[in-house]
């Protein structure tokens, strides 16, 4: 059993995006859908045989690329993200933060998308702000080599975020 979708949205995703200054309902929905797809909203933080970690299943190499190739070029944003990390644990085991620190993992997951120059969220209240549109963003920017289809992504969203409606 994973994390309650509405609590993840309210207590982790929304405040993290606001802290980064990038909040929108579309961004909130995208990260909630990503967590649903990647880990069943936290059903597994490190599945057997996998090297990715946390509710967003971020690989250590991708984590390093976010820092080296994106955040290093945006010092103000890097400072905000670093402020989300644990003071001592981050220095000893930075990748462990992806499994143990939900706000930090959410910020890194956001940059898995936002690091791409052509990344654009659906407009608020637009007809393309739906699960299939979010699935397309996930497939293009977050996990392009995945064999998961857009229909599978939508099914996982329905399964793990069942009573939730895309935030309007």
Image: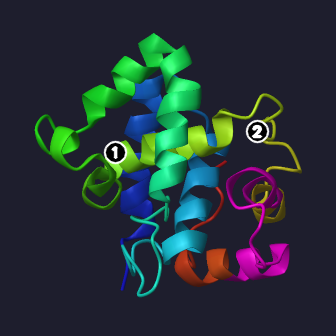
Magenta-tinted stretch: 136-155
Name the residue: 87% across, 50% down: 128
Instruction: Return the x and y of residue 167 as percentages of the image width and height.
Output: 62, 52
Mark 2 surroundings: few (<14), some (14-19) or many (≥20) residues within 10 A: some
Q: Is residue 142 shown in magenta?
A: yes
Relative vertical location of residue 25 with respect to residue 162 in this rendering, above or below: above
* Magenta highlight on residue 143: yes
Q: Is residue 11 visible?
A: no
The percent position of residue 164, horizontal first and vertical second, equals: 56, 68
Q: Answer above or below: position of 17 versus 2.
A: above
x, y (%) of residue 2?
A: 37, 78
Q: Residue placed at 38% from the left, 80% from the top?
A: 44
SS at circle 1: helix
Q: Nearer the viewer, residue 125 or 155?
A: 155
Quadrant position of residue 51:
bottom left
Where is 118 relative to 103, above or below?
above
**Residue placed furthest toward the right:** 127
Most extreme residue toward the top, as rendered?
A: 76
Query: Residue at coordinates 79% horizontally, 58% vertically from top-left?
Result: 130
* Circle 2 SS class: loop
Residue at left offset 27%, top offset 27% = 83
> Which residue is at the far left?
88
Q: Is residue 70 left or right of residue 93?
A: right
Q: Are marks 2 and 1 in contact (CB under 8 Å)?
A: no
Mark 1, Cα crowd under 10 Å, few <14 / some 14-19 / many 20+, is many
In 3D space, how far apart are the residues under numbered discs 2 and 1 (Cα atoms)? 20 Å
- Residue 121 numbered tag: 2
Is 124 left or right of 14, judged from the image as shown?
right
List the residue tagged with mark 1: 103
């Amino acid at each position: 059993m994973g994390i309650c979708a509405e609590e993840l949205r309210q207590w982790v995703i929304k405040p993290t995006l606001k802290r980064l200054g990038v909040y929108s309902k579309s961004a909130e929905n995208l990260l909630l859908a990503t967590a649903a797809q990647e880990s069943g909203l936290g059903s597994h933080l490190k599945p057997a045989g996998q090297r990715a970690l946390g509710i967003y299943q971020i690989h250590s190499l991708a984590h390093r690329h976010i820092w080296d190739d994106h955040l290093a070029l945006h010092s103000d944003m890097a400072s905000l993200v670093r402020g989300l990390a644990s003071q001592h644990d981050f220095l000893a085991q930075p990748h462990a933060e992806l499994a143990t620190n939900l706000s930090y993992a959410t910020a890194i997951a956001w940059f898995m998308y936002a690091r791409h120059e052509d990344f654009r969220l659906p407009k608020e209240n637009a007809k393309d702000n739906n699960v299939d549109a979010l699935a397309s963003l996930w497939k293009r920017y977050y996990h392009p080599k995945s064999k998961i289809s857009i229909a599978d992504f939508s099914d996982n969203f329905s399964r793990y975020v069942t009573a939730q409606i895309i935030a309007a």
